[in-house]
Amino acid sequence: VEMPIARTLPNGQQMKGRMDLLLQTAEGWVLFDHKASAAGSAQWGALATSYGGQLAAYGEAIAHVTGRPVKETWLVLPTAGVGLRVVALDQ
């Protein structure tokens, strides 16, 4: 079941979306977002980059509300049969 997520950012902008899966671990959260893409491996980097901002915004909102960090973010491509761990460049 998708879970809605919303937050007012410090600049007043509204962020709204729907998370596909949120897993609680002892270290923090693991966020998964499913994308219906059959992109080949040559396109996975670009795909992760294009959705990185969305995952980062969701992660920030989750951490803000729960007080627990998002330790990992993943794009799951069921059609391609792959999961891609998305890591921010500043990590």
Image (cartoon, grey):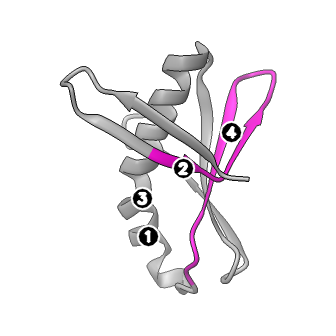
Q: Which mark is residue 47?
A: 1
**What span is colored magenta in the figure?**
17-37
Q: Earlier in the sequence, mark 2 or mark 4?
A: 2
Q: Earlier in the sequence, mark 4 or mark 1?
A: 4
Residue for point 45% across, 80% down: 43
Q: Which mark is residue 18?
A: 2
Q: Earlier in the sequence, mark 1 or mark 2?
A: 2
Q: Which mark is residue 32?
A: none
| Label 1 environment density (alpha carbons within 10 Å; few <14, some 14–19, many ≥20) | some
Residue at mark 1 to residue at mark 3: CA–CA distance: 6 Å
Depth check: give the residue in front, 29 or 15: 15
Q: Is residue 24 magenta?
A: yes
Give yes or no for contact between labels 2 and 4 (Cβ–Cβ under 8 Å).
Answer: no
Q: Is residue 72 magenta?
A: no
Estimate the x, y position of residue 16 in percent, counting from the top left: 41, 43
Residue at mark 3 to residue at mark 4: CA–CA distance: 16 Å
Residue for point 51% across, 35% down: 59
Mark 1 lies on a secondary structure that is: helix
Could you tell me the amino acid type at mark 2?
Arg
Could you tell me the amino acid type at mark 1?
Leu
Depth check: give the residue in front, 10 or 78: 10
Left or right: residue 83 versus residue 56 is right
Mark 3 lies on a secondary structure that is: helix
Could you tell me the amino acid type at mark 4?
Val
Estimate the x, y position of residue 20 in percent, counting from the top left: 65, 53
Residue at mark 1 to residue at mark 2: CA–CA distance: 18 Å
Give yes or no for contact between labels 3 and 4 (Cβ–Cβ under 8 Å).
Answer: no
Q: Is residue 68 above or below residue 36?
A: above
Residue for point 47% across, 83% down: 42
Mark 3 — residue?
Answer: 51
